[in-house]
Structures are given as structure tokens and as C-alpha cells.
Amino acid sequence: MLGLGKKGKVMTDSQWEQLLAVLRGERVEPLPVGFIIDSPWLPNWFGIDIINYLSNETAWLEANRRAVETFPEVWFMPGFWAEFGMCTEPSAFGACCVFQRNEFPFPKKNIRDISQLADFEWPDPATHGLLPFVIERLKWAQPHIEALGHKIRFSVSRGPLNVASFLMGMTEFLMALKTEPEAVHKLLSGITQFLQQWHQLQRSVFPSIDGMLVLDDVVGFMREADFMEFAYPYLKQLFAADVSVKFFHNDAPCAQSVRHYAAIGINLYNPGPQTPLNELRKLAGDGLTLMGNIPPRDVLAQGTPETIRKAVAAMLRETTDHTRLIVSCGGGMPPGTSTENIRAFIEAVRSYSS
């Protein structure tokens, strides 16, 4: 068994090796705790507005630094995430992005009719939208990140269906699966090629990257047959990248699709709280590492420290297999989660492991 060490910070070289050990099925003691953190939680927890976090590189760096130093036991993934909320990838396709002072940014749909694809100009991730700003922020931050004992470990993107739903609108996209399937395949194929180029660009600029994180909740809104036609081939193409950690986030229902994730190439999955870990393990098979899945809003954000301790203990007690497990919430860190509640979560995992 590997020891985490109480003073280690997330995604140092030693903790990266421990993450790889978990993916291989080795037991790590105490059980690792990990969270996805980004703009829905970090800015207000740090005490600033979301617009300051997104626009001010120093504030962004300091918020992430405070998180890793406040919770040195936690694996924050991807860690020091340079992002502009949901706007990053859609901005490259010309979507109008709305940034209010302390609200989550969002892109407006810009494909009014799928027939527009006939004249569509596919973007270049090196020059279009907000993507070059992500790269430049990470270039600026890299020496500061490494001075803290960290490295840039992950390339990150929204998934192809997620991007398509922003460009078309969710309802319009899901309807088009049935009414215009050929056009949808053309759109998803183009977006997937763009995302492959985007991940490759991130890896080429930052050779320390050996993982990828793809977030796509839209797969949770599809029945299995539609998942296999419209999601499986494009996710498989995207996850064919030559990296060690292939991390997928979908916190919408996954019972109809999770059995296919390992075949896609995914080896780490952050689900929502809808399905208990034991059932997820049966559906997913033994090869997929699960990162979950306490209810994020109702328990981690809105619960008391005592209810969090009880919920974590109950989840771990009811989960029969603790290999390939990173204890987390079912999704990203929810807005409003307090330092006290996160500490209670960590303490509950440590108490169970001891």
C-alpha cells in the first residue's frame, strides 16, 4: 500500500504517481480525496467576484494557491484550471459570451439552423476565441505553479456534445438527433477534430501534461442507442490521445452509458450522485476508477459538518470495493461549499481509513 503523507500537495510528482497507482487498482492509504474545482466555487470561496477571477490572472492564481494550501490532503483535478466557464470552446465558434459580475458566464447559441454548417468555418484553437488566452495564462502561471510544487498535468475541454448543445441550444440539438442525424454527425465530427487539436496544442505547449479531462453532461440526456450512435464514436476518437489519465466528467444520469466508458478509453470517471458506487461498479466493470459521489449541493454545500461526516461514513461503509476509488462529491465542487464542510469531508474519509 502507498502512503499519501499528510503534508503533500496535490499533483506533485509523488501524488501524480499515487494517482496512477489508484488507476492501476493498487490500494492507497488513507483513501484519496479529490475534487474538481473551478469558477462556480473558487471565486466566492476566495472572496472575489467571478468576473475578477476570470479576468485577473493574479487573482486566479492566488485563489488556486489558497485552495491547495488550505487543503493539502486533497487532490484537486485538473488543478490550476485556466478556464472561462462554459465559454471557452464555444467562443472559438463565434458564440457570443455573456460575463456578468458574479454570475456564471455562458455562451449564446449561434447556430440557428443546422443548414448553416454548409458554410461553416471551423476554428483554429491556436488563434480563435478565448483559447489563446487560456494558453497565455498558463504560460504566465507555469513558473509560479511549479514554485508551489505542482505541474500542469491535464489538458482540458468540454466534450463534443456539450459544445454542440451550446452552439445550437440543448433542446434544438437533442431534437436534431432525430430530425437531422446526418447534419448532427457532421457537426460532431468537426467539433471532435477541433477538440483533438485543442488537446494536442495544450500538450505541445506544456510537456508536463500526461492527462486529459473532458466534461460532457449531455451524454446523460440520451438513451443508450443514441449514446452509441452520437456520443461513443466521437468520445472514443477524442480519448485516443496518448496520455496516462483519461478523465471524464458527466454528472447527469449515466446508468445507460457507463458500461461503455472503459471501451472508449476512459480510466477515471466523476459521476453524479444518482447511482450508488456499488451499482456504478457493477455497471462500469472493474477497470474504471470512480471519483465520487456524495450529493454535492444537498450534502456537501448545504449540509452541516456532522451530516457530511455521516454521509461519507455511510457511503464508504456501503461501498464494498475501495480499490479504484477517489472519494469526492458527485460532480464538481458546488458553489457555497465552506471550508468547514470540506474539512469535515476530509476528516470523515481519514477517520474511516484509520
Image: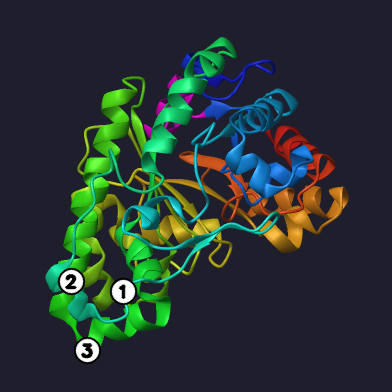
Q: Secondary structure at mark 1?
A: loop
Q: With respect to residue 236, does 75 lie above or below? A: above
Q: Is residue 183 above or below residue 160?
A: below
Residue 35, picture quadrant: top right
* Residue, far top: 147
Return the mark for residue 8.
none
In percent of width and height, residue 263 lies at 23, 52
Question: Which residue is identified by label 2?
Answer: 117
Position of the C terminus, as image quadrant, is: top right
Residue type, numbered disc 1: Ile
Please state the total of marks drawn on the protein image: 3
CA–CA distance between discs 3 and 2? 15 Å
The magenta segment: 16-27
Residue holding disc 1: 111
Whether residues under marks 2 and 1 lie with C-beta atoms below 8 angstroms apart, the answer is: yes
Report crowding for label 2: few under 14, some 14 to 19, many 20 or more residues within 10 A (C-alpha): some
- Considering only order in the chain, which callout, 3 or 1, is on the residue closer to the N terminus? 1
What's the distance in space between the residues labelled 2 and 1, CA to CA?
8 Å
Amino acid type assigned to the residue bearing label 3 in the image? Thr
